[in-house]
Image (cartoon, rainbow, N blue to C red):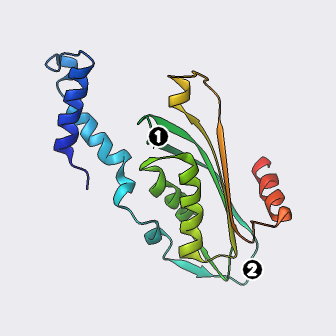
Amino acid sequence: MVDQEKIKAAVKLLLEGIGEDTGREGLLETPDRIARMYTEIFGGMEEDAGEHLKKRFHVKNNEMVVEKDITFYSTCEHHLMPFYGKAHVAYIPNGEVVGLSKLARTVEVFTRRPQLQEQLTAQIADALMEHLKPQGVMVMIEAEHMCMTMRGVKKPGSKTVTIVTRGIFEENNVLQNTFFALLKS
């Protein structure tokens, strides 16, 4: 559970640590604003992706389902700076599908936590495999990391791409290539 009082105290200490006057007008309400914001952007900490994947629909057709360009925002756990981009999710049903919005909600559960992109990609794939029990899953994430844009190497526009395959996607180049072709269309 998010402890807003601890966040407020930490923000005040941080502001003091960088030499700011926490009593000046523009900063008076900043600790409270940050605490409310963190409650929202880290709301996935206590969420279970399985809740979104419970309601399923029976299908006779087990063809690939792709939800692409799912916009997300997350926070790098190394620097507590944002990273953002697009997630692309595909699965081969095993007699059941979920509503398309549930794929986006699954992505959102994991992006609303301090996170590594590599871990995020795997968490999405693993949640789908565990709860939906499809024949296979493929997840690709493309993201820009502010820790690379604003600090350190300072390379704005660079993207990190991570890909995870599970089930029949792992060894099937035809399925993988179909997924990549659908992302281009």
Q: Residues within 10 Å of mark 1 (few under 14, many from 20)?
A: some
Q: Position of residue 83 (x, y in %)?
A: 51, 38
Disc 2 to disc 1: CB gap under 8 Å = no
Q: Is residue 157 above or below residue 61?
A: above
Q: Residues under labels 2 and 1: Cα distance?
A: 39 Å
Q: Is residue 171 above or below residue 117?
A: below
Q: Position of residue 114 (x, y in %)?
A: 42, 46
Query: Reading the chain from its start, which is encountered first: label 2 or label 1?
Result: 2
In this figure, which residue is indicated by the disc labeled 1? Answer: 76
> In terms of depth relative to the viewer, which is nearer, 78 or 1?
78
Q: Total of numbered circles in the picture?
A: 2
Q: Is residue 179 above or below residue 166?
A: above
Q: In front of the other: label 2 or label 1?
A: 1
Q: Tell me the SS state at disc 1.
A: strand
Q: Residue drawn at (13%, 19%), measured in percent from left and top?
A: 23
Q: What mark, if any, has residue 174 been given in the picture?
A: none
Q: Residue 48: name its quadrant.
A: bottom left
Q: Residue drawn at (31%, 40%), measured in percent from left and top?
A: 37
In this figure, which residue is indicated by the disc labeled 2? Answer: 61
Q: Is residue 70 above or below residue 146?
A: below
Q: Is 5 left, or right, of 175 in this rendering?
A: left
Amino acid identity at mark 1: Cys
Q: Position of residue 150 (x, y in %)?
A: 50, 22
Q: Tell me the SS state at disc 2.
A: loop
Q: Residue drawn at (51%, 30%), measured in percent from left and top?
A: 146
> In terms of depth relative to the viewer, which is nearer, 76 or 140?
76
Q: Residue drawn at (55%, 25%), measured in percent from left and top?
A: 149
Q: Is 34 left, or right, of 52 in this rendering?
A: left
Q: Residues within 10 Å of mark 2 (few under 14, many from 20)?
A: few
Q: Position of residue 94 (x, y in %)?
A: 68, 80
